[in-house]
Amino acid sequence: MKNVLKCALIGSFFAVSIAHAQETTTQEVVPAEVVGEDGIPTEVDVTTDTEMTLEEAIPLETEMEEKEVEMDAEAIKEAEEKEQKEAEKKIEKAEKKAKKAEKEIEKAEKEAKKAEKLAKAISSKKKGIAKSEKQISKLQSKLAKGKAKGSLSPVAIEKINSKIEKETNSIAKDKSKLAKLLKKQ
């Protein structure tokens, strides 16, 4: 029974030491199993070719297991940090997309307001032109009636003509502004 346990212990130690030797690239004490002169299993430090008894090899085994546990903990910690960084990057990308979408919505709203304002300006210019044309026709009819009756003085006729001229100039200005507004549309 003792031999079976010793063999199992040595086999597990040997498997762990091989796995550990493959993982590390630095020179460490790597024991190899050898049967000593007295028939008791001993281990040989491959790096220095010195013999070790099983009792001396057990602390090395525990040291190597502790190093493996530390390395596993570090690997887990690094993996968690990496996952956290990736998650943060995904969140940042999503935030950037949301901001970009907000900007697009704001831009579309601004353009809609601008188009609405332009439409109001066009309609107001058209109304202004129509109002000025009505005013001119009223002034012309008043002038024609006053001349026909002879009730207008030359000063009054001159005032009415200046008013008609002002309205004509304002219509010309409004029409040029309306043309500009229509080009923007």
Image (cartoon, helix red, strand yellow):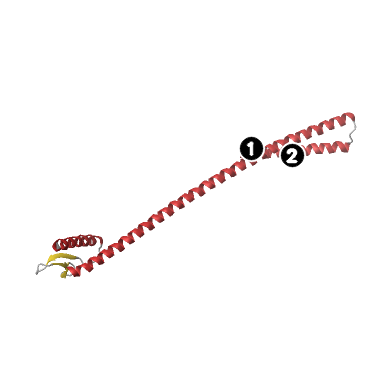
Crowding at label 1, few (<14), some or many (≥20) Cα neighbours within 10 Å?
Answer: few
Type of amino acid at the residue the image marks with label 2: Ser
Crowding at label 2, few (<14), some or many (≥20) Cα neighbours within 10 Å?
Answer: some
What percent of the width, then of the height, locates residue 132? 76, 36
Residue at 16%, 63% (x, y): give it: 6
Front residue of this view, candidates 66 and 150 = 66
Q: Is residue 80 visible?
A: yes
Query: Which quadrant of the view contains residue 179?
Result: top right
What percent of the width, then of the height, locates residue 88? 43, 54
Front residue of this view, candidates 54 and 154 = 54
Q: Tag 1 or tag 2, which sits nearer the N-term?
A: 2
Q: Quadrant of the C terminus?
A: top right
Q: Secondary structure at mark 2?
A: helix
| Picture layout, residue 49 above or below residue 134 | below
Residue at 89%, 29% (x, y): give it: 149
Left or right, 10 with respect to 166, comes to left
Residue at label 1? 182
Residue at label 2? 170
Residue at 67%, 39% (x, y): give it: 120
